[in-house]
Every structure is written in structure tokens, then in C-alpha cells.
Image (cartoon, helix red, strand yellow):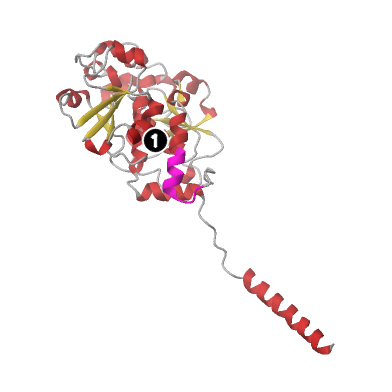
Amino acid sequence: MKKITTYFTLLFVATILLSGFKNHQPQTNDPTEFELLVQYLEANGNFINSALAPALVLAPEIKENLKNKKYLVIDIRTKDWFDYGHIQNAENVEGPELLNYFQTKITPADYDKITIVCYSGQSAAYYAGLLRLAGYNNVFNLKWGMSSWADEFATNIWKKNSTDAFADKLETTVNPLPEKGIAPTIKTGKIEGKDILMLRLKEAFAKPYKDYIVKTEIVFENPSEYYILNYLNEDKYNFGHVPGAVRYQPGTSLSSTADLYTLPTDKKILVSCETGQSAAYTIAYLQILGYDTYNLAYGANSYMNTTLNSKGWNGFSAKETHNYPVVE
């Protein structure tokens, strides 16, 4: 009986010691899906935080390469608009179908440049941004969209929406970056960054880009409804911006080692640039990461077009349009 008692006493002491040992072991936390995804993207080109973004092509380059089989133009406008007039040899593929088209219909590596075309350049920039994240590094968008190809397409797009309507509502206050906080929660069930990315891309392509567009008048009526991410260089920001906007440096600030973690996860993020096209690339990236992001339609051209033109800051004007032929 004494031996049994001694045995259980020793067993009890050993259990206590082992438990204490385990409790004092360093705790290791597995990376979240957000962290895995960011690590993967930053290790594989880090497009949005590089000098390559935005990936824009001008109309004259496309015109000069109409017979170049290494150039592919994909028009994502509706079939009716495509039939009304499109660039020679362009393919008509709806935006949500682009990923499948790249994966099953063409061999993207066969082309030097694949240019996505829309009405204004903004939708095309968004989808080009998603395709860049998918690893297609030869994808670009046509700057200003079909508005730059022929004047008739610009009438109800860039010409109509390039205004000075809110130029007197801007502020010059330098709003500070907030403290770094928590990241969005992503739940795909995958444990590899590449696999997480592919599922997130499929989700993004399934949702139409128009759901992310916010009109300028809505923003100026209630700017506090959004966390406004001003994606411009310092001189442009300091000249005047939407009230409350916080500046993030294009090409560097949205990396995990810079200011990515200062973005809120509990508020709509509105990205503002000059033309809406850099912003579209940015929201493609941030949507994939789980942020609730939107694009200020037509960028600063929608509220201070004259100033942009006078300072040479990507203002839309008649010189941006051409009278290149279209196929009907």
C-alpha cells in the first residue's frame, strides 16, 4: 500500500512539473490568412508597391501596333457598345469572365502586351490590377479608355465628368496617419498564400466593378462616411484634397512594413487619385486583402479639372483624345 501511495505521489508531482514546463514554453502563433496572402504577394512582384503601378498604355502605342500579333486588346464594354465601335482586332470579353479567359482561352505568355479597354480606363484598370495579382505581368489598361481612342466616346464619359464642381470645397490640412491596427479577417480555409489568392481572385471577379464606384457629389455631401485614402504625391495633396483625406505615398505606402496596417477595417475606404485609374489598381489590391474599398469616380478630375490641367497633373482635356478609326 505504501508503494502504491508513493507511486501516485510521484506521478502527481511529475504531472505538475510537466504542466509547468509546458506553460512556460514560448507560444507560437500561426500566421493568419491575411498575413500569408500579404507575404505571398510581396514576395512575388509586390506590384502595387512598385514603380510598375499603374500599368497604363497610351492610345498611340496601340494604334502603332494594330498589326502586331504580340499585342492583344481586350474590350470589356458591353456587346452593344463593342458592336457600335471598337479597336481593330479587339476581343470582347466581359470583366467578370477575364480570369477564366486567361486561364482557358489564350496563352497570355504569347503576348508582349495585353491591354484591357473600357469606357474611361477605370474599370479596365481594376481588372488589369486583379490580373496582375494573378501573375499576368504583361497586362495593362488603355489610359482614359475608349475616350482616348475617338472623341465621340469621350463626350458622355470624360468630357461630361471632368469638372471644377467642388474646387472651392477642398482643404489643405495635412491629416495624420492613424496608428497601426488590426488587419482584415480572411477565411478561405487555405494555408498557402497562392491558394488563398486564387480563391480571393475568384470572389473578386464575381463581383462587378460598378459596385465599387462612388460619385463625387456623394463624397462631398458627407466625407466623414468614408476613410479617404488620398493616393497622390505630397505636392498634389498639399494643394487641396477632399476634407479629411489622409495621404498615402503611391508605390511604397501599402506594404506590410510601411502603412498598410494603418487602414481601418471598420469603415469604408475611399481611394482618390487624379484619374480614378491608379485608384482602381489600388482597390483591386485592397479588396483582395479584405478591405472594404471604393473608388472616387474620375478622381480629382471630377472636382478640380482646370487646376490639374494648368499644373500638368493628369487632367483630362481635348488633347487626350484622338480620332482613330473603329470597327463597327
| Residue 291 placement (x, y as % from top left) | 49, 37
Please tell me how crowded label 1 is: few (under 14), some (14-19), or many (20+) other residues with Cα within 10 Å. Answer: many
* Helix, strand or loop at mark 1: helix
**Looking at the figure, which quarter contains the C terminus?**
top left
Q: Where is residue 26 in the image (x, y as percent from the top left)?
A: 56, 67
The secondary structure that most of the magenta stretch takes on is helix
Q: Residue furthest bottom?
A: 2
Q: Which residue is drawn at 17% across and 22% down?
A: 63
Among all residues in the image, which is located at the extreme right? 1
The magenta stretch is 190-200
Q: Which amino acid does label 1 sit on?
A: Thr
Would residue 191 be counted in the magenta stretch? yes
Left or right, 283 with respect to 58, comes to right
Residue 89 lies in magenta, yes or no?
A: no
**Image position of 299 with respect to 200: above or below:** above
* For residue 319, above or below residue 108: above
Residue at 37 percent across and 25 percent down: it is 123
Q: Residue at x 74, y 83 (%)?
A: 10
Q: Mark 1 points at which residue?
A: 282
Residue 255 at what x, y percent from top left?
Answer: 40, 46
State which quarter of the image contains the N terminus.
bottom right
Choose top left, top right, bottom left or bottom right for residue 13. bottom right
Location of residue 283 by image quarter: top left
**Along the line of sight, which residue is nearer the eye, 112 or 43?**
112
Q: Is residue 253 above or below residue 97?
A: below
Whether residue 250 is visible, yes or no, is no
Residue at image location 25% in from the left, 22% down from the top: 90
Q: In this orientation, does residue 269 appear?
A: yes
